Image (cartoon, rainbow, N blue to C red):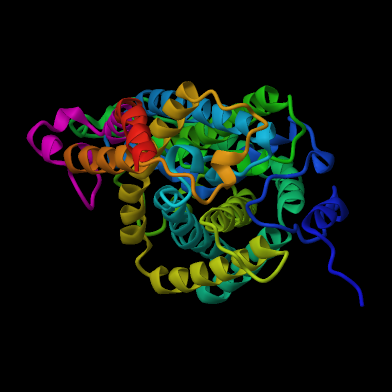
Amino acid sequence: MTTSPSLDELYHEYGTRATAVEPGGAEPIPLADRHGKPSQMFWTWVSPNMEFATIFVGVISVLFFGLTFWQAVGAAVLGSALGGLFHAVLTSWGPERGLAQMVLSRRPFGYRGNLLPAGINAVVAGAGWFAVNSISGALALSALTGWNGYVCLVVGVVLMLVVAFLGHNFVHLFERVAFPVLVVVFLAGMAVILPATQTGPMGDAVPGGFWIALGATFGYAAGWNPYASDYSRYLPPGTGRRAGLYAGFGNFLGCTVLEVAGAAAVTAVGPANWDSANPTGSYISLMPAWLGAVTLLAIFVGAISANALNLYSAAMSFAALGLRLPTPFARAAIAVATGSAGLIVAILTLEHVETYEGFLLVIAYWIGPWLGVMIADRLLDKTATDDLTPFVDTRHVNLAGPVAMGVAMVVSIVLFSNQQLYTGLLVRVAPAIGDITFEVGFVLAFALYALLRRPLARSRAAT
């Protein structure tokens, strides 16, 4: 009779093999099995931003918010820099304890209270943005090949599932291979678009348009924050700071460059001539036919690149909920289930993706309050890096995190949201406020957690 290998033995066998299936779920990565270099964080975070969704953030800055080209550039730079800064900080935490981002979230939220952020992230990443990116990739492939859109959708999702199913090492390998291809293609497109850029006003500016665009660019870059340490947790201890710098800069650069490209394309085509029903067609209309075709292929590859991370981190978030599956490859099994659910959502929303994406943009405001709690806890808690108790003990409770995040979410969204599907109460009265939902959510959650952490801890100790 033979015994099954332990999880530590499976991690050791996995090692640096890119084509093997990654074992485990939300467990800390053993020190003996840490590997990789901080520099790999750069292409891992540039590549997933090389997709049409990033371009579209720049498009809406001009087309919907009425900014000039240079105002859109300013919003892209500032918003992406802020999101990239947080991304750098969170990435740097991964090598310390070898834990995924939503497992690190257990200390400020408690083991069960972590259901709030981890549950939202699992659903929004796995059935939300995964579906949106799958659709954009499918439409690009359909435009390139003439194939049926639903066929293209299935083809794309299968490829995304393969990358996420194999896991950490293959995800990094795919992003490294995709990196030069995507960068060269999109920079070639920009070389054609930028000379045709118009820098003057394109129409009437929306009240508070710059602040709305700034919130959108910050939110887009920060949208990757709940995934950050998922991809740095295998690195050896002591490499966190360098990994953070590479990750933050990669996130900033990928977002900024393609958002600028999107803003430039709208001014070059002209808002009146821009086809909102076929934005990819409008984007490539300025390019030679061969470059337009290659760009469509790059958009498809970029969707795979982004969704490999969406699906992998959705599976990690589900694992962080404390699920116990009868398999040593729990994360891989969850990735398949999550991707299958995302495919169903994509099929149902293929004809109505604009409305669905608008819903996701409102939901994305949860990240600001979650960040506020995470940063406040990091500054206030002095737990030694070798103490994993708050992250693995099922009895760990911290009510301050869920309360602070919940209150901050409600207040910031109800008062300050400025999206097509919902406009906040204060914004309706004073549109010039723009959209400061992320900022208000972050600051309010930070302050509430700092105030509630000790009283709630004492209350818990007394029960």
What secondary structure do most residues of the magenta stretch adopt? helix
Q: Nearer the viewer, residue 246 or 136?
A: 246
Q: Residue furthest front?
A: 462
Q: Residue at x 51, y 49 (%)?
A: 52
The C terminus sits in image quarter = top left
Q: Nearer the viewer, residue 308 or 275?
A: 308
State whether residue 310 appears in this view. yes
Q: Residue at x 67, y 31 (%)?
A: 386
- Number of marks in the rendered image: 0
Residue 345 image-quadrant placement: bottom left
The N terminus sits in image quarter = bottom right
The question of residue 429 being in magenta is answered with yes
- Tell me if residue 191 comes above or below residue 28 in the rendering: above
Left or right of residue 213, residue 419 in this image: left
Residue 95 image-quadrant placement: top right
Q: Which residues are magenta?
A: 416-445
Q: Residue furthest left?
A: 429
Q: Nearer the viewer, residue 354 or 423?
A: 423
Q: Residue at x 62, y 56 (%)?
A: 304
Q: Residue at x 55, y 62 (%)?
A: 323
